[in-house]
């Protein structure tokens, strides 16, 4: 199924997860004073209701060991200064999304642990038992860690699980401890999806390979409106989104990831739909403007979706 004209080429195409502090209760204890009291942002979208969930946040130093690995220190510093951000540190955000659609409660990713995600869900009026579908976009630890608690009990006991076949097959063969602990035990409740297939009516997968071998984005469509969950296709609004050819340490295939970024961002800019990014500054949603052939600009959403 082809959703938008510029999507037909998406996409031919592992890393260690980020550490994370759960929000909101655990954040103060961990010294993360920058965590806001509001840890969810809910808006109506056509027939859907969408909530972005701040599962955690943390400060990170030595950021050019993660972003812009293929540019000079001077260029990295200049671009950072132009965008009024420090070049030596950053605040990372971890933002699952939950969508009430077609009679289902669909959660996209689960955070590094269950605590932050379930706390944000509670603020959105959703109990863990209310979640009916959990979509795993890719198998990095900050996306699958909240599937179970330390005892192995499911965080979302009434849910079934959906993930990409390519992604699952890769990690199933990788001997990865996180996958084996969190995802493999759920195999009997897991179904698999390919590019252009529906989770429920109005939620369609978009192959976005490169960050991991089977990384998936998802397009939400309702009443003629669109919003794309780009997940980890771009992991920072300047050092990844604005400069899509800058290499990111956690992209498994850096060339494929850059190509994916350019295609997704070009599509979002041309068709003027908002994107939700897992690591964008909370609440994680914004628009994309194409500056030139090599650069984009991220425009955070403001009140467009609450009017």
Image: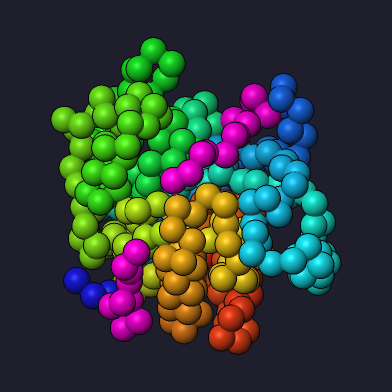
Residue 19 is covered by the magenta coloring: yes
Q: What kind of secondary structure does the magenta stretch mostly adopt?
A: loop
State whether residue 261 is above or below residue 111.
below
Q: Is residue 206 left or right of residue 165?
A: right
Instruction: Identify which residue, 256 or 201, lies in the foreground.
Output: 256
State whether residue 47 is above or below residue 61.
below
Q: Is residue 64 left or right of residue 41?
A: right
| Magenta stretch, residue numbers | 4-27
Q: Position of residue 75 (x, y in %)?
A: 77, 70
Residue ranking furthest to the bottom: 292
State whether residue 222 is above or below residue 97.
below
| Colour option used | rainbow
Q: Which residue is drawn at 53% across and 46% down?
A: 95
Q: Position of residue 269 (x, y in %)?
A: 50, 80
Q: Where is residue 59 in the image (x, y as percent from the top left)?
A: 72, 41
Q: Which residue is drawn at 49% across and 54% down?
A: 251
Q: In this view, does 178 lie to the left or right of 56?
A: left
């Amino acid at each position: 199924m082809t959703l938008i004209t510029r999507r037909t080429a998406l996409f031919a195409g592992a890393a260690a997860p980020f550490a994370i502090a759960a929000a909101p209760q655990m954040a103060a204890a961990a010294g993360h004073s920058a965590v806001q009291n509001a840890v969810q942002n809910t808006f109506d979208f056509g027939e859907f209701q969408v909530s972005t969930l701040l599962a955690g946040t943390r400060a990170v130093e030595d950021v050019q060991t993660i972003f812009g690995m293929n540019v000079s220190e001077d260029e990295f510093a200049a671009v950072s200064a132009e965008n009024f951000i420090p070049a030596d540190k950053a605040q990372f955000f971890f933002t699952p999304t939950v969508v009430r659609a077609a009679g289902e409660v669909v959660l996209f990713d689960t955070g590094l642990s269950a605590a932050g995600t379930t706390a944000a869900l509670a603020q959105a009026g959703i109990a863990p038992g209310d979640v009916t579908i959990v979509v795993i976009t890719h198998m990095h630890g900050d996306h699958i860690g909240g599937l179970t608690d330390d005892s192995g009990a499911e965080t979302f006991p009434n849910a079934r699980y959906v993930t990409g076949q390519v992604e699952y097959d890769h990690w199933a063969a990788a001997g990865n401890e996180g996958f084996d602990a969190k995802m493999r035990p759920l195999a009997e409740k897991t179904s698999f999806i390919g590019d252009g297939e529906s989770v429920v009516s109005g939620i369609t997968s978009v192959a976005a390979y490169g960050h991991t071998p089977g990384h998936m984005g998802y397009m939400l469509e309702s009443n003629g409106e669109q919003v794309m969950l780009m997940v980890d296709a771009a992991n920072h609004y300047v050092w990844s989104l604005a400069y899509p050819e800058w290499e990111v340490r956690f992209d498994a295939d850096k060339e494929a990831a850059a190509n994916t970024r350019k295609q997704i961002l070009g599509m979002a800019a041309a068709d003027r739909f908002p994107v939700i990014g897992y690591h964008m500054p909370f609440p994680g949603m914004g628009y994309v403007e194409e500056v030139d052939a090599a650069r984009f600009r991220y425009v955070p959403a403001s009140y467009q979706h609450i009017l």
